[in-house]
Image: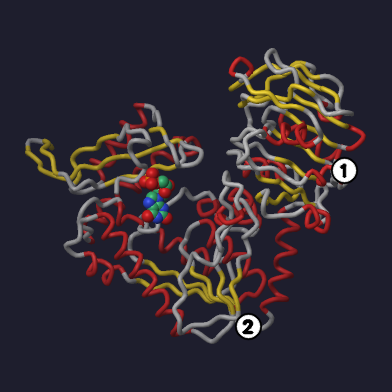
Amino acid sequence: MEKILVLDFGGQYNQLIARRVRDHHVYAEIMPYNGITVEQIREEGYRGIIFTGGPNSVYDNTSPHYDPAVLDLGIPILGICYGCQLIAYMAGGRIEGAMESSEYGMVTLYSGPSVLYDGIPDESIVWMSHTDYVNRLPEDYTITGTTAKCPCASMENASRNIYGVQFHPEVTHSQYGNQILYNFLYKVCKCSGDWKMEHFIDDTVEQLREKIGNKGVVLGLSGGVDSSVAAALLSRAVGKQLTCVFVDQGLMRKDEGDFVENTFTRLFDMNFVRVNCQEAFLEKLKGVSEPEEKRRIIGTEFYKVFWEEVRARYSGGYFAQGTIYPDRIESGKGDAATIKTHHNQVKMPEDITFDGVIEPLQDLFKDEVRKVGEKLGLPRDLVWRQPFPGPGLGVRVIGEVTAERIRILQEADWVLRDEVARSGYDEKLAQFFAVLPGVKTVGVMGDHRTYEELIAIRAVTTDDFMTADWAKIPYDLLGRISNRIINEVEHVNRVVYDITQKPPGTVEWE
Ligand code: XMP
């Protein structure tokens, strides 16, 4: 399989670069600049290298540098932002930094002839974010693009296949960024585009069969996207040799446990074990209202029940989990030490030893995981499921968790989801749910005074969940949601909408 190396110098868009490359059907992997040597790059046989951006200045002693021998490998290179400056610096050019030349945001690029700009008009919009710029070109390089403030917005040494762009082609604000990456991948690196999810499925199934042989595999299924897709993939590979353990603590959304069970027992060949343990969980949560304590109890109990079940069925073999690529890399640090050891997600009890851990999705980004899930026949509702916290409704019932309070929340949340889905507005929301704050308010129904529960609606838009905005849901939709919740959910007489941004608020209430 052909592959591109994304050499990470600490910029904020590094995962995005790899994702964009993969969108063009070329496999890309990210390595921190100090995690791979020139010799290793040569041995790996990369088709091309992309130097990422970074927050630094090349003249700063602490800034990340790389062995200039990389320029002599004969492998095509594209430097982006800091990556472009680094190429210029390594090749003998000069970098300058001045506030007057700094650019941030959308800027007009005037581009000249270059294979990178094939099919692109001479004037186009690009996204810039820099103070330093290349002020003297290295020998044998030419300028291929300028902006009003930046004399070298792009440069190249075409005979050596080395290119640099000061702007960020990977962000959607760069009008023809995708075409520029395409040109680099297909016209410079001469890729053929062999990274397709169908191939991934076929190859992975084959590798899994070979590795697992006739042994068993145990997978903890949460009903989330990653573990569900991992289960579907393993099912295709080894069928009944796979045992999925689904611990249902009764803290999922309405009917969700049944949906997960139906999906995996009807559509996939495997041993499916569902452990219903709501009562035991509620017993442990009795009288507990402190959020972190609730989280701790739910987490501890979950693993206790899970491992008891695994222990009861244990007969050797492998342990599988749905780790995905972003779980393993931490972008923006450019430091090998920050690569997480990827077996740290589930703590194994000492008395159970497996032949190994299998993570069939470990090289995939989330959107690729979803594509694989769709191709394997998982229902849309599961593949496109919105994020759901591990402790489930336990952190959306504020204060003490009881069976009745979970029921009220589940009903209200179900109405919310139904109404949002009918309006088609769910496509615009990153996450939306109901919260039961545990506040009673006075109301009037018919001629009667009521004193019942309050429901809060939380709906956010966000790209990364680090920051989020409250969604501007149309008033008429909010009105229908409120009416239906009050009419259909017993013991609720008031609905409010949460209009808090993150920060300072968090997405969840607890
Ligand atoms: P916050 O509330 O921190 O949420 O703004 C950001 C995202 O993380 C999810 N979340 C959790 N996920 N265990 C999880 O697996 C948790 O304890 C947890 N708390 C929050 C939240 O749903 C949102 O998508």
Packing grade of label 2 (10 A; few <14, some 14-19, many >=20) is some
Q: What residue is disc 1 on?
A: 190
Tell me which residue sits at (61%, 51%) in the image: 365
Determine whether label 1 and label 2 are within 8 Å by CB.
no
Across and down, in percent, residue 86 comes to: 72, 35
Mark 2, secondary structure of its residue:
loop
Mark 1, secondary structure of its residue:
loop
Q: Is mark 1 within 8 Å of ligand 1?
A: no
Label 1 vs 2, first from the N-terminus: 1
Question: Which image quarter holds the N terminus?
Answer: bottom right
Quadrant of res 501: top left
Tell me which residue sits at (72%, 54%) in the image: 36
Q: Which mark is residue 181?
A: none
- Left or right of 429 in this view: 506: left
Residue at the extreme right of the image, as rendered = 159
The residue under label 2 is which amino acid type?
Lys
- Left or right of 365 in this view: 146: right
C-alpha separation, residue under disc 1 versus residue under disc 2: 42 Å
Across and down, in percent, residue 24 comes to: 75, 42
In the image, residue 152 sits, relative to residue 375, either above or below, namely above
In the image, residue 430 sits, relative to residue 358, either above or below, namely above
Tell me which residue sits at (34%, 26%) in the image: 475
In the image, residue 227 sits, relative to residue 457, either above or below, namely below
- In the depicted view, which residue is nearer to us: 506 or 369? 506
Residue at the extreme bottom of the image, as rendered = 315
Does the rendering let one see residue 389? Answer: no
The residue under label 1 is which amino acid type?
Lys
Q: What residue is disc 2 on?
A: 215
In the image, residue 86 sits, relative to residue 33, either above or below, namely above
Across and down, in percent, residue 447 comes to: 7, 35
Across and down, in percent, residue 32 comes to: 65, 50
